[in-house]
Image: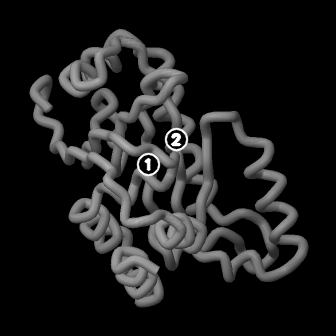
Amino acid sequence: MTADATDFLRLIDGKPAEREVQRFLEQRPHLLLNLMQARTAAVVKQFPLGADHRADFAFVHANSGGTYLHLVELESPRARIFTKSDSFSQQFNGALQQVQDWMFWCNLHSASLRELVRPILRHFGTDTVYVQGTVMIGRRAELSTLRRRHRFEFLVQDLPRRFHVRTFDGFAEEIARSAESSSIVRMFSYRGKEA
């Protein structure tokens, strides 16, 4: 297991607040590439989408299929996925809705989106952007009953193709599986049109 994976597991086992996870990933932006098995990316923290939305992270990566803007919503590892009655929690549903709202905004404001990411896109030599979104929330231990597992798996399978939900345990496993690779990552803070 890599040092990053060990450190990440130690962090989430300590039941941190969302902000602690955000800081950890800001210091190690290459870990976000494990969400999509990307090798080269530009990562932006607190990425603004108009006046009303802000993604915890956005990263731009390219592959043979095009250039992708991946929006990430972090919740706390201690956030509940389910209620005691095995329904999805308000926090879980709220996180899903937030990412759906981001993706809707991107679709509705495609010209504005291209302007937002133009400083990054020039590094990838393209002007076309495909948007994806991920919610990272809770721990796998919450999928403790067959009913909860089935509900979670059905929801994940029923999501649109470019929308993902991950527990922190699943993300930690991706980090552990990834080799100490030669990924190239650039971290940005967004300041208007100059990224």
Whether residue 54 is visible:
yes
Whether residue 138 is visible:
no
> Which numbered marker is on residue 175?
none
Of residues 150 and 64, which is closer to you in this image?
Answer: 64
Residue receiving disc 2:
133
Q: Is residue 172 above or below residue 70?
A: below
Identified by mark 2, the residue type is: Gly
**Real-space Cα separation, disc 1 to disc 2, in angstroms:** 6 Å
Residue 52 in percent (x, y) is at 34, 35
Figure quadrant of residue 41: top left
Count of picture labels:
2
Residue at screen point 47% across, 67% down: 175
Mark 1 vs 2, N-terminal side: 1
Residue at screen point 11% across, 35% down: 191
Q: Is residue 193 left or right of residue 113?
A: left
Residue receiving disc 1:
72
Identified by mark 1, the residue type is: Val
Residue at screen point 31% across, 63% down: 25
Residue 67 in percent (x, y) is at 43, 24
**SS state under label 1:** strand
Mark 2 packing: few (<14 Cα in 10 Å), some, or many (20+)?
many
Marks 1 & 2, CB-CB < 8 Å contact: yes
Residue at screen point 82% across, 71% down: 148
